Image (cartoon, rainbow, N blue to C red):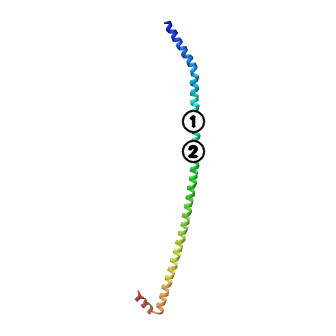
């Protein structure tokens, strides 16, 4: 029984010495792994930050191009609206002028018929 106690004590002491010798190395390796992981995370964060900045710059460029395209479309639409308004105004003026000439023609036809009633007879035969 004494021998068993001595063997147990020796084993415990040997284990304690081994733990005392190995524990710092285990902690050092764990700290190194943690440091490597931290460095990897920092590198990855830096990479993400660079990508984020690149995407933000591209987004700004695309936004500016879209704004410019929209402005061009609005300007072209305004120019088309102006041309349409001008064409409509010219059309109304021509219609007004045509109506005026038609009224003048009717007036002159009426005068001609008043001056020479036979003109009206020839006209009705032609129609």
Q: Position of residue 103 (x, y in %)?
A: 49, 83
Left or right: where 108 falls relative to 125:
right
Helix, strand or loop for disc 1: helix
In the image, 103 versus 25, the foreground residue is 25
Q: Position of residue 26 (x, y in %)?
A: 56, 24
State the count of labels.
2
- The image quadrant where one finds the C terminus is bottom left
Q: Residue at x 57, y 59 (%)?
A: 71
Q: Is residue 95 above or below residue 7?
A: below
Q: Position of residue 58 (x, y in %)?
A: 57, 50
Residue 52's tag is: 2
Left or right: where 116 falls relative to 65:
left
Q: Based on the displayed image, in which of its 4 quarters is residue 117 positioned? A: bottom left
Q: Which residue is mark 1?
A: 40
Q: Residue at x 52, y 79 (%)?
A: 97
Helix, strand or loop for disc 2: helix
Q: Label 2: how many residues lie within 10 Å, few (<14), some (14-19) or many (20+)? A: few
Observer-side mark, 2 or 1, equals: 1
* Separation of residues labelled 2 and 1 (CA atoms): 18 Å
């Amino acid at each position: 029984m004494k021998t068993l106690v001595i063997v147990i004590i020796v084993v415990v002491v040997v284990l304690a010495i081994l733990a005392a010798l190995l524990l710092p190395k285990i902690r050092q390796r764990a700290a190194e792994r943690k440091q490597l992981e931290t460095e990897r995370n920092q590198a990855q964060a830096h990479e993400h930050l660079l990508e984020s900045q690149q995407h933000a710059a591209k987004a700004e460029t695309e936004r500016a191009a879209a704004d410019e395209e929209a402005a061009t479309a609005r300007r072209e639409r305004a120019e088309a609206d102006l041309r349409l308004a001008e064409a409509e105004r010219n059309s109304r003026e021509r219609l007004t002028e045509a109506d005026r000439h038609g009224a003048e023609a009717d007036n002159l036809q009426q005068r001609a018929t008043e001056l020479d009633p036979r003109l009206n007879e020839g006209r009705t035969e032609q129609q």
